[in-house]
Image: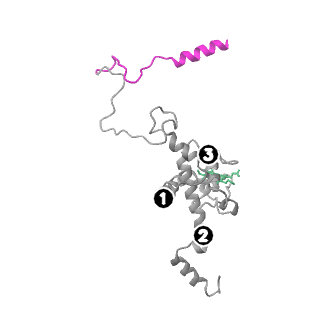
Amino acid sequence: MLAGCEQRMRDMYEQPRYDPGESSTLWPDGKAGRPPVAGTVAWAAGDLAATSSGRRGTDIPRDVDRAEQAAALPPLTPALLARGRERYGIYCLPCHGAVGDGDGPVVRRGFPRPPSYHQERLRTAPDRHFYDVISQGFGVMKPYADRVTPQDRWAITAYVRALQLSQHAPFDRLPPRLQARIGVASAPEGGS
Ligand code: HEC
């Protein structure tokens, strides 16, 4: 009986249909496929856009491999950080919040609160930890590997590092202008 089911399944795979480029008597131009509406602009986005087979990553293996094997951030550029900021806003901010302290809008509506990126353990965690959490998930946080490409995981990691620095900048790494201002502001207390 089960064998019979399998046979029927196969029959469903082999239904009558038109393949790309096939002809048909249904339309005056004799083609099964319909031409795009006038003014249509061909456009593709996402990590399958550059592939011809439609199989994820098979046509862009070099960049993906490099990103997947890297242990630390790629060279920092304004473009990488901008991309990371944009992707963070889409995929992480809803829970982790704009500054990364774990009070995003989804959390305010009852989702478990993630830890703040500004705690010592995550400040000193290796870059790769963030990449791995995005790829594999962590505890109740789901993995984002199917939505965030390897390159974008590094871009997000770079942006998270920038967020961490924004909340915990060592004095000697501040630009001189800010150092001077803080020095003046804390002077009345005899500050350090
Ligand atoms: C739907 C909510 C949600 C989203 C979206 C989300 N996270 Fe999380 N994240 C969590 C929660 C909750 C935890 C704590 C999980 C636990 O400890 O069980 C967490 C934990 C983490 C941790 C800490 C892991 C550790 O060592 O404690 C990192 C880093 C992290 N997330 C990064 C990210 C990044 C980067 C993104 C975006 C790609 C993201 N998360 C998207 C909810 C989310």
The one nearer the camera, 94 or 53, is: 53
Label 3 lies in ligand 1 vicinity (Cβ under 8 Å): no
Q: Which residues are magenta?
A: 1-28
Within-10-Å neighbours for mark 2: few <14, some 14–19, many 20+: few
Q: Quadrant of residue 146?
A: top right
Q: Tell me the element at label 2.
A: loop
- One can see residue 42 in this view: yes
Q: Residue at x 48, y 33 (%)?
A: 54
The answer to whether the residues at label 2 and label 3 have Cβ atoms under 8 Å apart is: no
Q: Looking at numbered disc 3 in the image, what kind of residue is underneath it?
A: Ser
Comparing 146 with 154, the one in front is 154
Instruction: Confirm whether residue 147 shows in the render.
Output: no
Label 2 vs 1, first from the N-terminus: 1
Question: Picture quarter containing residue 72?
Answer: bottom right
Q: Which residue is mark 1?
A: 77
The colour style of the image is one colour
Residue 22 left/right relative to 123: left
Left or right? Give the position of 80 relative to 127.
left
Task: Indicate which label's residue lies in the foreground, 2 or 1.
Answer: 1
Please report the residue visible at 54 percent of the width from the left and 18 percent of the height from the top.
12
**Residue 13 — which label?**
none
Give percent across and percent down for residue 170.
61, 71
- Disc 1 marks which amino acid? Thr
The one nearer the camera, 122 or 61, is: 61
Q: Where does label 2 land, which residue?
A: 169
Where is residue 9 drawn, in percent x and y? 58, 18
Amino acid on which disc 2 is placed:
Ala
Q: CA distance from mark 1 to mark 3?
A: 23 Å
> Which residue in the structure is indicated by mark 3?
135
